[in-house]
Image (cartoon, helix red, strand yellow):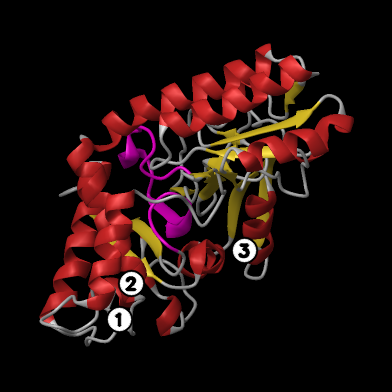
């Protein structure tokens, strides 16, 4: 039976990417596996260079003063690294969910943090709007897509200070003017590759302005100088991310995948809104195109619905404990056909109820 993977992360990947990555595990370089060759070999250095180049190309940031890095530690490490490298006196944060809240906690280790707005009062089911960003702070940090709660920033403020964004769960999914951001970071396992590496896109001219000594492993400038090879990189995660970015480029880039993502989201939310057995969690104007969160109106139907979607080959639909209900994660590699299968199951439940 075909599986329809709605898991929030690690994400669904293109079948051809998984095929190529598996072949590289067996034979990548003249009979040697990808995971046993030297990371300093030309074969892998070329992979790293291609991955970094593809990231900038897809985002339209080539030749604009940005560097791409592939590092370890996940997005959670970036909560700390952003503050280490950029926070001198005070920074502004927008609190839109669990991961934004954790980023604030890490930054508070170093200095005062101003929370310009928060949606915590409504269990993060909306994106705050109309807030002011002070001009005398070091940077403004936001989270573009909130995986757990199913909300997404549809626009970004015109920030008078460097704009930092955690794009872990919607990187490469929609067209934006990425040059408005001074630093972007994204864990690979949400929309780009397997767990194990994190993409950082940083404008070089914002670095080197803090007075503290930064440990080498946490210093963006060190990693830039060493071309993401300061220490042994996560070779399989970088290679698979490179394959996924090449797959996206071959499809026509972000603009092409955005059209597919829009179709999937419209189909999914249409069913949530029209089917009286379900209700959406997130405010309609802030709904995520990547993660649709919804619940049953009548919890007595839960056992029946759970059995139905599992029998249909659907995987990873259960919602996060913070929200409950269900979460359909529709990342780039999830097909429209998979969304149609889920919608058909929801329709069938309505006919039975």
User: Is residue 256 shown in magenta?
Assistant: no
SS at circle 2: helix
Judging by the rendered image, the residue that carries numbered circle 3 is 107
Residue 145, by quadrant, is top right
Image position of 152 (left or right of 162)? right
How far apart are the two marked residues, 2 and 3, measured between alpha carbons? 30 Å
Location of residue 312 in the rendering, given as x and y in whole percent from the top left corner: 59, 37
Image position of 63 (left or right of 107)? left
- Image: 27 above or below 258: below
Location of residue 83 in the rendering, given as x and y in whole percent from the top left corner: 53, 65
In the image, which residues are magenta?
A: 170-194
Image position of 137 (left or right of 305)? left
Foreground label between 2 and 3: 2
Q: Nearer the viewer, residue 98 or 79?
A: 98
How far apart are the two marked residues, 3 and 1, measured between alpha carbons? 35 Å
Q: Nearer the viewer, residue 22 or 264?
A: 22
Res 35 label: 1
How far apart are the two marked residues, 2 and 1, measured between alpha carbons? 7 Å
Q: Earlier in the sequence, mark 2 or mark 3?
A: 3
Res 236 label: 2
Location of residue 191 in the rendering, given as x and y in whole percent from the top left corner: 43, 49
Residue positioned most to the top: 274
């Amino acid at each position: 039976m075909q599986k329809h993977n709605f898991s929030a992360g690690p994400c669904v990947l293109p079948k051809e990417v998984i095929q190529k990555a598996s072949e590289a595990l067996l034979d990548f370089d003249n009979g040697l596996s990808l995971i046993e060759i030297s990371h300093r070999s030309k074969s892998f250095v070329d992979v790293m260079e291609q991955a970094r180049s593809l990231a900038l190309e897809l985002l339209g940031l080539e030749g604009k003063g940005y560097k791409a890095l592939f590092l370890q530690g996940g997005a959670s490490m970036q909560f700390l690294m952003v503050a280490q490298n950029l926070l001198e006196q005070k920074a502004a944060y927008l609190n839109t969910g669990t991961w934004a809240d954790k980023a604030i906690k890490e930054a508070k280790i170093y200095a005062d943090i101003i929370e310009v707005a928060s949606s915590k009062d409504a269990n993060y089911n909306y994106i705050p709007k109309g807030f002011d960003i002070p001009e005398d702070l070091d940077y403004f940090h936001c989270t573009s897509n909130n995986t757990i709660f199913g909300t997404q920033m549809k626009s970004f403020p015109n920030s008078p200070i460097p704009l930092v964004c955690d794009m872990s769960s919607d990187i490469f999914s929609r067209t934006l003017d990425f040059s408005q951001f001074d630093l972007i970071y994204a864990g690979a396992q949400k929309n780009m590759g397997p767990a194990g590496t994190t993409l950082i896109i940083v404008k070089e001219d914002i670095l080197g302005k803090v007075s503290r000594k930064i440990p080498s492993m946490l210093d963006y400038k060190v990693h830039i100088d060493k071309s993401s090879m300061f220490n042994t990189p996560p070779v399989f995660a970088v290679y698979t991310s490179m394959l996924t970015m090449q797959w996206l480029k071959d499809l026509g880039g972000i603009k092409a995948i955005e059209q597919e993502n829009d179709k999937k989201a419209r189909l999914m939310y249409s069913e949530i809104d029209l089917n009286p057995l379900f209700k959406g969690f997130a405010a309609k104007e802030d709904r995520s195109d990547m993660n649709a969160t919804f619940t049953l109106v009548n919890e007595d139907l839960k056992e029946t619905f759970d059995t139905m979607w599992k029998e249909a080959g659907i995987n990873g639909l259960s919602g996060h404990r913070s929200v409950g209900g269900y979460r359909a994660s529709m990342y780039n590699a999830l097909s429209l056909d998979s969304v149609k299968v889920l919608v058909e199951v929801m329709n069938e439940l309505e006919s039975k109820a």
